[in-house]
Image (spheres, rainbow, N blue to C red):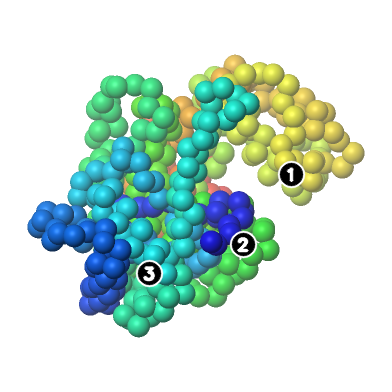
């Protein structure tokens, strides 16, 4: 039996039911693997009668999705050693994806040596009565399956991703209410931008991928373990809300969102270089706007300190302050000590920084961060809607956007007009330049 370490198994990517194989190479791979399943069923006696037509169709669809997810692991541009995290809970399946077919494929491919499987579990913690903990099944293709992929001619063009069944997701649901009209209206914009992105060729040169991969191997990339890091099939955008429809709502699902800022400048849209425009200090600006207090300073800095890392510390600290739901004393987070100004404790820094944020103190410790995400996501939808109307492909990264360089002015104007229409004031926009530097 194969032994797995916890670190290995945590390095996983989520199962995506929208992934598919395509082309002749994809058809060949499906046929070869389907033969493996039939041979295993015959040899093991697990199936003694011919499948009904609907069951055969279900197996074909489920196997297509399963193999596409495994192939995407192999073709990942950042790390091709990741596992696939797959649920085998019936509540997570919706036709035509079949739990029975997925279970058959898993067991057959494992028995035939095409995949390694670390089976998931749900356990009861004996020290905390009633508290459960679990891990989804982890699956990784073996060298045998990867060789079969090569023999069948599988390459990146052999993969596609279907539009999400719904671009609206409410996680950890605390309400049975349907999406409010303004959220439901955003579906049309998301569908339109997904169609644009699906038809566009969005690429990053090999040397940029190599640098990103090296950064990951060195443990220096904080974004490396995100769900879609390095997975260039990830192009289906969704708005993800948290608990209720007025929290969260940010857009996720694009692989470019996990490309480090210093490398995003190398992205190409249909072979053309890009430009990135960003709403500067958006969440602090939205809060200051509520108080009618002008935000005429950088809210992430601290006067009198010249530490090169103090702005990064300010951004981290601001997010913690507005996302926490109590106002108890806050300790330094992991890594904060390395960002502090010389000869200053975190307690001293926090006291000074909170004084700087005094005009918006009423929202600290209230969990306002998720509600601000709803605001910035509404703004992003407005911007994307304007770009769709102009037939321009725009790649969102929360409060910044990438477009082809020739559309730079159109994007910045759309961002300014969308903000002014909502908040009746002019935003601070910054163009992200080479190596992550910015200019007004």
Q: Is residue 95 visible?
A: yes
Q: Residue at x 48, y 37 (%)?
A: 122
Instruction: Please name which of the two marks, 3 or 2, marks the residue nearer to the observer.
Output: 3
Judging by the rendered image, the residue that carries numbered circle 3 is: 112
> Residue 139's spot in the image, x, y percent?
45, 58
Residue 82 vs residue 114, the one in the foreground: 114
Q: Position of residue 172 (x, y in %)?
A: 41, 29
Front residue of 27/157: it is 27
Label at residue 335:
1
Image point (63%, 32%), residue name: 320
Residue 408 visible in rendering: no
* 145 relative to 393, above or below: below
Furthest residue toward right? 343
What is the x, y in percent for residue 91? 31, 37
The residue at 42%/39% (across/down) is: 250
Q: Residue at x 46, y 74 (%)?
A: 143
**SS label for mark 1:** loop
The mark found on residue 283 in the picture is: none
What number is the disc on residue 216?
2
Q: What's the CA distance linking mark 3 and mark 2?
A: 32 Å
- Asked whether, in this view, residue 241 is left or right of residue 345, the answer is left
437 vs 252, left or right, is right
């Amino acid at each position: 039996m194969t032994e797995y370490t916890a670190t290995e198994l945590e390095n996983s990517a989520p199962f995506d039911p929208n992934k598919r194989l395509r082309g002749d190479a994809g058809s060949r791979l499906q046929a070869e693997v389907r033969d493996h399943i039939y041979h295993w069923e015959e040899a093991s006696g697990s199936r003694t009668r011919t499948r009904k037509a609907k069951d055969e169709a279900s197996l074909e669809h489920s196997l297509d999705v399963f193999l596409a997810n495994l192939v995407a692991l192999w073709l990942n541009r950042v790390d091709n050693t990741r596992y696939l995290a797959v649920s085998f809970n019936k509540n997570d399946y919706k036709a035509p994806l079949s739990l029975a077919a997925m279970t058959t494929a898993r067991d057959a491919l494992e028995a035939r040596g095409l995949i390694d499987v670390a089976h998931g579990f749900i356990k009861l913690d004996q020290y905390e009565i009633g508290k459960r903990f679990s891990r989804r099944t982890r699956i990784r293709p073996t060298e045998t399956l990867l060789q079969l992929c090569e023999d069948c001619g599988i390459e990146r063009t052999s993969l596609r991703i279907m539009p999400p069944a719904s671009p609206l997701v409410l996680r950890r649901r605390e309400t049975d209410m349907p999406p409010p009209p303004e959220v439901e209206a955003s579906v049309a914009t998301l569908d339109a931008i997904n169609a644009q992105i699906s038809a566009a060729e969005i690429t990053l040169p090999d040397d940029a991928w190599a640098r990103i991969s090296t950064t990951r191997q060195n443990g220096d990339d904080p974004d490396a373990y995100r769900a879609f890091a390095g997975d260039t099939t990830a192009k289906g955008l969704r708005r993800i809300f948290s608990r209720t429809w007025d929290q969260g709502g940010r857009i996720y699902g694009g692989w470019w969102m996990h490309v480090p800022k210093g490398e995003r400048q190398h992205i190409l849209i249909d072979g053309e270089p890009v430009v990135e425009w960003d709403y500067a200090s958006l969440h602090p600006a939205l809060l200051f706007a509520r108080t009618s207090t002008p935000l005429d300073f950088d809210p992430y800095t601290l006067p009198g300190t010249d530490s090169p890392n103090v702005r990064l510390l300010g951004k981290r600290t601001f997010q913690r302050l507005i996302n926490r739901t109590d106002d108890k004393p806050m300790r330094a987070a992991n890594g904060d000590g390395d960002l502090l100004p010389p000869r200053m404790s975190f307690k001293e820094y926090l006291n000074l920084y909170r004084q700087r944020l005094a005009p918006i103190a009423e929202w600290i410790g209230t969990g306002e961060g998720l509600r601000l995400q709803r605001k910035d996501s509404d703004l992003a939808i407005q911007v994307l809607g304007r770009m769709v109307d102009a037939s321009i492909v725009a790649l969102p990264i929360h409060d910044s956007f990438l477009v082809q360089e020739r559309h730079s002015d159109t994007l910045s104007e759309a961002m300014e007009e969308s903000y002014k229409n909502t908040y009746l004031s002019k935003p601070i926009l910054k163009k992200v330049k080479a190596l992550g530097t910015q200019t007004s």
